[in-house]
Image (cartoon, coloured by chain):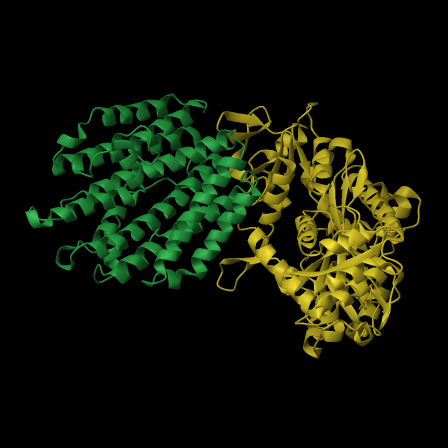
Amino acid sequence: MSIDWNNYPCEDFYDELLQAPGQARAAGEVMAADLAALGIDELTARQEAANVAIKEMGITFTVYSEEGGTIDRTWPFDVIPRVIPELEWRRVEAGLKQRVKALNLFIDDLYHEQKIIRDKVFPKEILEKSVNFRPQCVGVDPPLGIWAHICGSDLVRDSDGTIYVLEDNLRVPSGVSYMLENRLVTKRVFPELFEHYAPLPVDDYPSQLFDTLAALSPRPAEYPEVAVLTPGIYNSAYFEHAYLAQQMGAELVEGRDLFVDSDDCCYMRTVDGPERVDVIYRRVDDLFLDPEAFNPESALGVPGLMRAWKAGHVALANAPGAGVADDKVVYAFVPEIIKYYLDQDPIIPNVPTYRCMEADALQYVIEHIAELVVKPANESGGYGMLVGPASTQAERDKFISLVKKDPRNYIAQPTLKLATVPTVIKHSVEPRHVDLRPFILSADRRQVTMGGLTRVALRKGSLVVNSSQGGGSKDTWIVPEGAGEGPSTSSQQQSQS
Amino acid sequence: MLSRVAENTYWLARYIERAENTARIVSVNANLLLDLPKGIAPGWRPLVDITGANDLFNEHYRDYGERQVVRFLLGDERHSGSTMSALAAARENCRTIRDIVPREAWEQINGLYLFAGEHLQKGMTKTGRHAYLKALITSCQTIAGLLDGTMLHDQGYEFMRLGRYMERADMTTRIADVRSAALLPDADDLRPYDNIQWVSVLKSMTAYQMYRRSEQIRVQRGPVLRFIFQNQLFPRSVRYCVEHARVCQERLPRNEAALRVTLRLARLLDGAEMARLSQAELHAFVDDLQLGIADLHATVAETWFPPPLFPVEAAA
């Protein structure tokens, strides 16, 4: 059975492939035609092939089960790639670089002179109540003055097609390995589509990441010793830690593999004896990094690591304390932050955000709570937030009292009508909502992944894209102009074969 | 190479080897029993004796029936030596060192683990068993081959081989010990079956065909014992395993203590006159070897592996 795009219901939302039922967008013409020619039976077969490939490749993520144990689940993936025209992407790329540059200047300022506070652009009380500000980091000068070397920013597209930044993840953003694996799986199951599109490659991310990390090395050496510090196999992102270490040819270490000696240098325990480490890509949260400086109970960290970092004997990426800018209330100030440090207007807008700490905004949020999404400052994974239109009166009342009690800790945003992308749902193709997490690397230069990780809410109408809550993912294709346009001759050849 | 990674690599190989060996002894026993007259057949208990896990077995099962023993050896997750447990442990070890294990090998290990679990019920039936075990054994061999053929032959590789040879040496001594126990009364009319017993000892370690090629005499106790303990060329003989464990250690730093223990083991093997050992002497000899292998493991761990997270209990 072939796919009839005329029956594809995309009138209520911005669909990235089709502008109206039966009518593909310019960049999606070949894709729509190719998918239609494949037919739903073949598409379903490809989906099954992809599921098998993912299971065999052992692409997993870990979820915490109710019994207290952990389950290693295979990664949910939808085969239909998401197409974004390169011209549009180049603007997004510039916007992300601008944003991360400003955020790094902001963090560095907060741990030094705090000019932005003195100039009354950023309120002092927000910093005072920030749970991610680390007094231990005040006055530290990390290499190149950069704190957030790896940033994952979440982008969403609203019903008019505008792309917004929804949040910035500056602590230990994850997902990039799935972006890489999704591409690999798509190559296996859709080789012919690749020929039509030639999407821009994403596979150079691991080497770019290695270069970024190597640029931070305190010892000028051709091959600095780089290690990825993981909390261990029970961490939900362990797959990614191992994957990146493997792809970079770096050591994957746990806290107990490392120690800091009396010379304030960090060493690995190896078969040959101790070996000095130059750069640590740490995937352990600040508070668990060093039991001497932070949580004394932490068994994941390395005693003395902060000492070694402050002495400049080992580089940490991201730097401890970078999370101060990874806060949904700080997020609300990013346009001002960009203006302040770069004297530029933001290229990618923020989602309009009500800062509950401001009296007018608080009043508005309380009155319109049923239309808004209310988020606490420091939760991730979609936890602890209220989606107004989907909430009960009791939930709304609870949130109103929460927000009133601690307005600094909350922001509210209008409920976005997230864009959709065609998705294989039980032997048919239906629109599902998506977001996008590109990754931005910063060291001696800034680089943005071509596309990023597209997450898709697999439940009909759902806006929750987190894999721990029923979300899936898609391969994301940034396609050069003209690649996906015009009549496709080879798709006819294909239907004959 | 990180000490922790060295340890995981070593155990990865040991667990894969353990899964394969367990699958082999189950498979061979099933065949052996078909060849022996009903009244005198030793049944399934010797397999549990080989693993040495009799206490655990008795705790959970009433008798040494076929179904019980096969379940215990293949599917029982409470038994750390069952193929399922060994494969789960191998996969878990591999998961922690995915950065050094070639991707194809990881996929194979992961696939084997999934296969073993999905087909376990069928694998425990009389009719499904042969195909199941054969698939397990082949897959273990594939993993060993993939690792040999695609992994860097660096320190990690030496630890992997070290683990493999030590597990194999350990298993070979156990099989020989249990399987060579006189299972038949000394009566002339049972002679033909005596032959079958020694054939099965060889087959438990896939040694039958190579024995014939190498020894060119009929299958009998003395030459068989010599072959599986002392042959320098057969990759499952104890001597071969010890020699190759030595070669691995030669390529590792700070190897003095481990080499000393290994050479002691080699001398013990070379000095034995296998054919002249009575059954009791053989048993004592195997005990000595087992102690030596345990000592070697302890020395390897102390030299190259990280300090244990929790102090090891003296009884364990």
**Left or right, A371 with reference to A295:** right
Q: Position of residue B123 (x, y in %)?
A: 37, 60
Residue at image point 76% right, 50% down: A438
Judging depth in this view, the residue of A116 and A320 nearest the camera is A320
Q: Position of residue A357 (x, y in %)?
A: 80, 60
* Displayed quadrant of residue B231: top left
Is residue B39 visible in the rendered structure shown here? Answer: yes
Q: Position of residue A84 (x, y in %)?
A: 83, 56
Chain B: its colour in the image is green
Residue at image point 31% right, 62% down: B126
Is residue A58 visible in the rendered structure shown here? Answer: no
Chain coloured yellow in the rendered structure = A
Residue lying furthest left: B187
**Which image quadrant: the N terminus of chain A?**
bottom right
Residue lying furthest bottom: A393
**Left or right, A287 with reference to B258:** right
Residue at image point 30% right, 40% down: B209
**Left or right, A27 with reference to A203:** right
